[in-house]
Structures are given as C-alpha cells and as structure tokens.
Amino acid sequence: MPAPRIPPLAESDLTDEQRELVGGVDLSGQAGNLFATLVRHPGLFRRWLPFGGKLLSGKLPARDRELLILRTAANCHTHYEWGQHALLAAHAGLKPDEIERTVVPSTDGWSDEDALLLRAADELHANAVLGDDTWAALSARYTEPQLMEVPFLVGHYHMVAFVLNSFGVEREDGVPGPPEAQATRPQASS
C-alpha cells in the first residue's frame, strides 16, 4: 500500500487547539490514525466529530447500524473503515461469518431483516436513493427518527470513505482487513 497522502500527526506535533480537539483520545490506539489525520483541519474536525458521534449513538440498534456501516465500507472499498467497524460489529452482536460476508455483493443467506439493511446500503450506494419497496419495508420496521438515520448513516460513511481512501489513512496494528473479496483499495486515476 502506498504511503499516506496526508500522514497522521504525532502527538508531539499537535498544536494546543488540536490537542484540545482530540481530547483524551490515544492517538497510538485503535482509531488513532483517523483522528491524528483529520485533526490537521481543526475547523472541519470540530464540526465533524459531534455529527459522527451522534450517528454512532443514534436511534438505530447497534447491530443494524454496524451492518449498514460494514456494507457501506465494503461498497466503497474502505479497508480502514471496514476494519474499525468489524471490531465494533462484533461487540454489537454480529457473528464473525456475518462480518466477513458483508463484503459479498449479495443478500443470499441473510435473514429478511439483515437483507433489508444490506439492500438499503446497496441502493443508496448505487442510486443515491432508497427504492420505494425498500423505503416501505424500512418504514414498517423503524420509527421515523430511525428511518431518517439510515440514509444519514450510509451517506456519512460514504463521505468518511472518500476521505480515508483519498488521504490513504492506514489501519492500525491489530485492526483487521476485509476478506479477499475486497482486497484492493481503489487508486485515483492520473
């Protein structure tokens, strides 16, 4: 993998403002490269962090949220995002084989509830809109705030994927990579 285009800052290189923004985050820890890279733009980081945090503690059940994020990461070929959320998904109740299957572009073998979420992430990725049938099925399952979070969540993680892939943010030691079905990171054309 090529070197990061925008490398993470070392803790010793942080300004006082950047240090305050990352708070107590251990930049040598599990998501350190993400925060140590994005904090290079303090104004954006300051506004992005609460929004992303709200989605991670939103109204959707944690398992459903992580399934949507993993499929979005797989669709966007974002190894960093997929690895970070594979760890979170395990804590949210997804089984190891389910986590690995999120990279397979199919809903075969999934429960109807999980297939609906995968289809929603796929439709948003491909068409930038939820189809009427998917919308109706999600509406029958979720409250209005939960339903609203589905495209917000997938859209947010698309944006994060664009950033991670473009900046070349590298996974930390101990963060898994996706199965072989998603082995390559897209490269920008010259």
Image: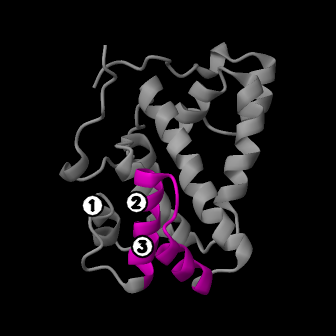
Which comes sooner in the sequence, label 2 or label 3?
3
Residue 94 picture quarter = bottom left
Q: Which residues are magenta?
A: 113-140
Q: Is residue 36 above or below residue 92?
A: above
Compared to residue 180, the image places residue 86 above or below, namely below
Q: Earlier in the sequence, mark 3 or mark 1?
A: 3
Q: Amino acid at mark 3?
A: Leu
Residue 57, given in percent of the width and then of the height, sits at 69, 62
Where residue 40 sits in the image (x, y, percent)?
65, 20
Above or below residue 150? Residue 22 is above
Label 3 element class = loop
Q: Is residue 88 visible?
A: no
Q: Spatial distance from mark 3 to mark 1, Cα to Cα?
A: 18 Å
Q: Which residue is label 3 attached to?
A: 94
Quarter in which the N terminus is drawn: top left
| Residue wearing tag 1 | 105
Q: Residue at x 55, y 80 (%)?
A: 136
Note whether 156 is above or below 35 in the view shown: below
